Image: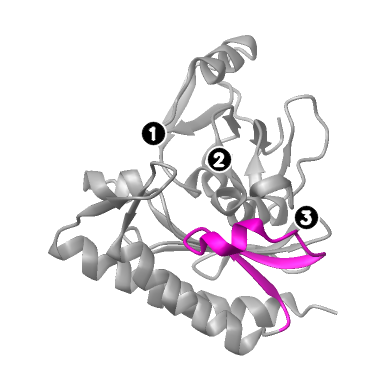
Amino acid sequence: MTNYSKMIEVLEPVAREAGNAIMEVYRKGVTAKTKGDGSPVTEADQRAEAIILKTLKSEFPEITIISEENAASHSLAAPERFFLVDPLDGTKEFLKQDGKGSFTVNIALVENGIPTMGVVFAPALDRMFSGSIKAGAHENGAGIQIRDVPQEGPVAVASASHRDEATDQWLAKHSIDQTVSIGSSLKFCLVAAGEADVYPRFGPTMEWDTAAGDAVLRAAGGGVENPDGSLFAYGKANYRNGPFVAKGKM
């Protein structure tokens, strides 16, 4: 039986160490290379990944790791239990250096298609989120939970770099006119922390982009579902997500 609290105790310091390495690169100036799929990768991604994988392999050698920067892992069939790792989520925001700090370190455990534990660290903001199905959700050690929808109406979080027409149509359909634009898995965490109410996403994402934030949100009392209301599950072909809606009490 998985001891989620112990796992979080191990992984929060690792996420912070990876975040510190990311910030070292951030402060000295960032250059990016382009991967085969056209997405950017930086020295920060690579340094953070090395830190995270070393600990996962040492502390949890029996659990398969699927990581964004390890392309060979993407062809593995999803086992019943595996880690999903994105060492630097929000690389485009990282490269902008716009002062918003909306990039994160993501580490998640998936069991039978569901993210049961997640750690999300935003190093530029010093916001450490974690959550599990047993221990609830926390930010910097304090408990967090989804909020009641405000009387003035729900607030949606939307992608800073990938906002699309389908998202705008969904917001209009649900009469939501208050939005916060932010990058990375922080969108899940803002809903989990009661700072927003819903995060609709219709553009492309990968499972390592979403699993850790998804776990935190579920632990805070929220949920993630397909647009038709069915369960949003993990371990899909090539670890590629379809559209989803992450929400609190909506």
**Location of residue 182 by image quarter:** top left
The figure's colour scheme reads one colour
Identity, as a three-letter code, of the amino acid under mark 1: Ala
Pointers 3 and 1 in contact (C-beta within 8 Å) = no
Residue 187 at x, y = what percent?
A: 51, 42
Identity of the residue drawn at 56% across and 17% down: 166
68 magenta-colored:
yes
Q: Mark 3 to mark 1: distance in Å?
A: 26 Å
SS at circle 2: strand
Identity, as a three-letter code, of the amino acid under mark 2: Thr
Residue that carries the numbered disc 2 in the rendered image = 205
- The span shown in magenta is 62-84
Q: How many circles with numbers are drawn on the protein?
A: 3
Q: Crowding at label 1, few (<14), some or many (≥20) Cα neighbours within 10 Å?
A: some
Residue that carries the numbered disc 1 in the rendered image = 160
Seen in the picture, residue 30 relative to 185 is either above or below; the reply is below
Q: Counting residues from the N terminus, which is met first, the one under dot 3 or under dot 1?
A: 3
Q: Quadrant of the C terminus?
A: top right
Residue 34 at x, y = what percent?
A: 32, 48
- Asked whether, in this view, residue 23 is left or right of residue 158, the answer is left
User: Does residue 159 appear anywhere in the picture?
Assistant: yes
127 magenta-colored:
no
**Location of residue 26 by image quarter:** bottom left
Residue that carries the numbered disc 3 in the rendered image = 114
